[in-house]
Amino acid sequence: MNYKQVKDAAQSYVDRYDQELVNAIPGFTKVVESKINSALKTGEQSVRAQIWLERNKEYYGLPGDWGGFRDVELVRRGSQSINEGTGYHPVGGMTLIYVNPEQMNATNRRETQRYYTVIANQIQVAPPTDNDILEVVYYQRVPALQQDIDSNWLSEKHPDCYIFGLCAEICAFAKDAVGFEMYKMRFAEALADIAMDDQVTRWSGPSLRTYTDGLIV
């Protein structure tokens, strides 16, 4: 569904078509998208990106649509098929360990293990390295719906999430406590269904197992 279809459906559910509501819906949509971005971390939001590292530099800007890291990996210069701006490495690299900013301050910059943390919308990598690649997998925020013809993966695959989220905000705006609680619950159910669908479709084969010191749990 595109944005117009989502808005029309939400208005049909709450049976309100006045101009005051029409003017308020773009703001409600931003609120709903903010809640969705906070609640969802699914495979469909996963995006790969590369950051080229420089000598004596520890801080690098995050992607504009960054919504949280899933994996941060250092790929050594000289790995095959690495070309600036295009290539991905054919084999694994070094997975960086997350530490909080206070722990980062205490790390030994001469260690071989590397660490990362997030400060002020930047990723800090230490110890610094030169001309290697930081390959990251991050959760992309849901692309915003703004124009009537706009759509994104969520509005196409799970339009109920948008619709019931909007209905909840409209009811809150109208001081309709009963309607708000009902649509809030349906919005939460839609989010839970998406998370469950992600778990079912992401994995295949036998059930997941945890390995600890040679033991299978």
Image (cartoon, helix red, strand yellow):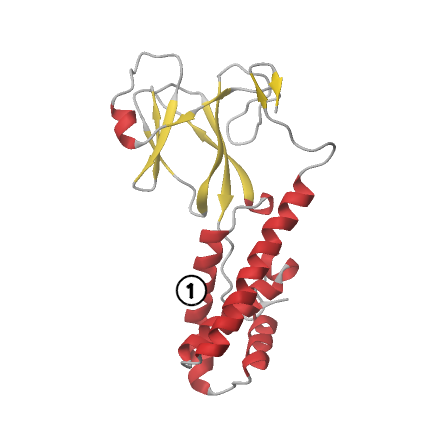
Give the percent coordinates (x, y) of residue 54.
Answer: 36, 23
Q: Is residue 42 above or below residue 207?
A: below
Kindly give the residue lying farthest to the right in the view shown. Answer: 205
Name which quarter of the figure residue 121 lies in: top left
- Answer yes or no: is residue 152 visible: no
Give the percent coordinates (x, y) of residue 83.
Answer: 54, 25
Give the percent coordinates (x, y) of residue 23.
Answer: 43, 79
Name which quarter of the figure residue 106 lies in: top left
| Circle 1 Cα neighbour tier, 10 Å, few/some/many (<14 / 14–19 / ≥20) | some
Q: Amino acid at mark 1?
A: Val
Does residue 131 appear left or right of residue 122 in this picture? right
Q: Which residue is mark 1?
A: 31
Does residue 27 appear left or right of residue 143 in this picture? left
Dot 1: element: helix
* Residue at 49%, 66% in the rendered image: 146
Quadrant into which the C terminus falls = top right
Quadrant into which the N terminus falls = bottom right
- Answer yes or no: is residue 175 visible: yes
> Which of 147/96 is in front?
96
